[in-house]
Amino acid sequence: MATGTDAGQLIGVVTLLGAAVVAVPLFKRLGLGSVLGYLAAGLAIGPYGLGLVTDTETILNVAQLGVVMFLFIIGLGMKPSHLWGLRRQIFGLGSMQAVLCATLLTGVGIALGFPWRMAFVSGAGFVLTSTAIVMQVLAERGDILAPRGQRIVSILLFEDLLIVPLLAAVAFLAPGDAAPAAASPLWQRVGLGLLSLGALVAAGLWLLNPLFRVLAKAKAREVMTAAALLVVLGAALLMELGGLSMAMGAFVAGVLLSESSFRHQLEADVEPFRGLLLGLFFLGVGMALDLDVVSLDWRLIGLGVIALMLAKALCVYLAARLARGSRADAIDRAALMAQGGEFAFVLFAEALRLKVISPEVNADMSAIIVLSMALTPLVGAVHKRYARAEAATLDGVETPQDLRGKVLIIGFGRVGQIASQGPLAKGAELSIIDNDPDVIRNAARYGFKVYFGDGARADVLRSAGARHASVILVCVDDPVAATRIVENARRECLHTRLIVRAFDREHALELVRLDADDVVRETFESALLMGRQAVLALGATDQEADELVGEVRDRDAERFALETAGGTFAGRALVLGNIDRIDPPRHDRKPASTPAMADDEA
């Protein structure tokens, strides 16, 4: 039978889970993101809200492992060669942003009336962005591996390294009566950090892969999971003992295992723990907001949040622009990184111990940090809602001028690239246009000359050589644009063969009525192929499978012909997932023994 203490602990766990289950879906539905939902839930159930959960410090200490595991998974996705390629961003862009922010934020602290030592420590703490919040937002947006996401990850890595010199600076600024309590000299801290990092790299290179090979041969699934957690937590502990951040240790361990054959297994083992603990971390941050402190010094704290977030956003924007980032990229980064982070609490605790800041300043700055973290998802949601889409740069992109290719391809995405292979193999001369500059630049890397142009415009079709082409392949993934292209192309060049990508059956019917020659429904043939594989899996021979698929294709072609102009359409050839001309319906065939196939994607 459970004791009262056990029941109380279970009530706390149930309360945490219930708050997350209620708040997170609600905030995501409102477009505010899961992070703000966790923070709001933590504030509501914490000691300064309803008081349902009070042990905030313990929860935060445990939940920091969620941040550690998140960085381990990020590291698994980065090979050492890729990380080496980011070295200029990590140390160049990261150091520039850190210096700008530290300088301006120190000035803001002095303007608010703090002595310069307190202003520096407070400003330096605000320089350290919340890795947990930024990474979670980037993950939700799918931007971690995008170029803009990689730049942000690089800055966060530099800030994780920055905690060591900042702690040393706090010890240097300590007054004389606090000097005996100061930590070891800087050279010892740096040496210990480098030694810990070297030990971790050595273990990653020579111990981890042999360990996982031995465990894999044992075929004990739970032991592999335990080993994955051991690697993450062991790397974090090693970095913590060396004076570096636990998250940095986990990230390095992930990078060292990124080329291992066990990478996907490790990611699958760690992911469930990462999600739960990271959510718990955000709940803990919400519970840590001391509303009593906020109510006592609300003017100073409110002004501090606004001033520090605006100043840091300005610094982040300037650093991005000085590094030749686009305006939209700079604004997005400023909105995402204009907050303090969890490592600021470590810096403030050390500064309080060494009497560099007072207990009142520590309480106020901790409240400012938590509020800034809570406001970041809200600022990001507002920015996403009202920010203008950045105009695509046309650097290195040419517009078509009287092209003469025998085959004109409009749209060079996945479909256009594959469709071009046949004409190329035949030796035909291609003219290619697309309205996405990024697609054009990427295609150039593989030897394709793609011109910028909107095929839905008649003048662009003329410049692209539509009148001289024998075949026009319309491969765009926008049904409305494809319809407009067919309308214009049929007016401009009556005798050119039009082969068009259709979104679904309804779109295909519309294109046929506009006199397109060949219409290919974009998922029809792949769906038939999946059906063929299913028939083979049921024991059919290749010939039987081909016959059954042919029956399905024929019935679909008959129905399509009947739907086109009431079955009287007898004009142009159609391609409905296959490459054969549709024959008129055969009324002498037996009724189908299977139900009529539903419209694809309809």
Image (cartoon, rainbow, N blue to C red):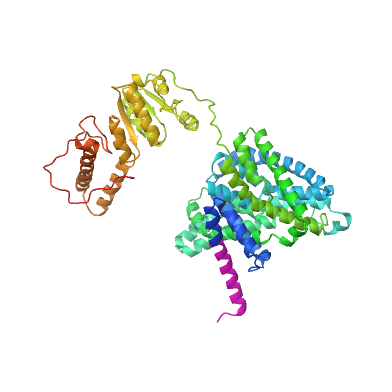
Q: Position of residue 438 (x, y in %)?
A: 50, 32
| Of the pair 370 and 237, the residue shown nearer to us | 370
**148 left or right, relative to 299:** left
- The residue under the point 34% across, 35% down is 501
Give whichever of 163, 523 is nearer the camera. Answer: 523
**For the N terminus, which image quadrant?**
bottom right
- Side of 111 relative to 319 (left or right): right
- Quarter assignment of residue 281: bottom right
Above or below, comparing residue 105 to residue 374 in the picture: above
Q: Which residues are magenta?
A: 1-21
Q: Position of residue 286 (x, y in %)?
A: 65, 59
| Residue found at x 61% / y 79% | 4
- For the question of whether residue 335 can be seen, the reply is yes
Check if residue 42 falls in the magenta segment. Answer: no
Q: In front: 567, or 553?
A: 567
The quarter of the rendered structure image containing the C terminus is top left
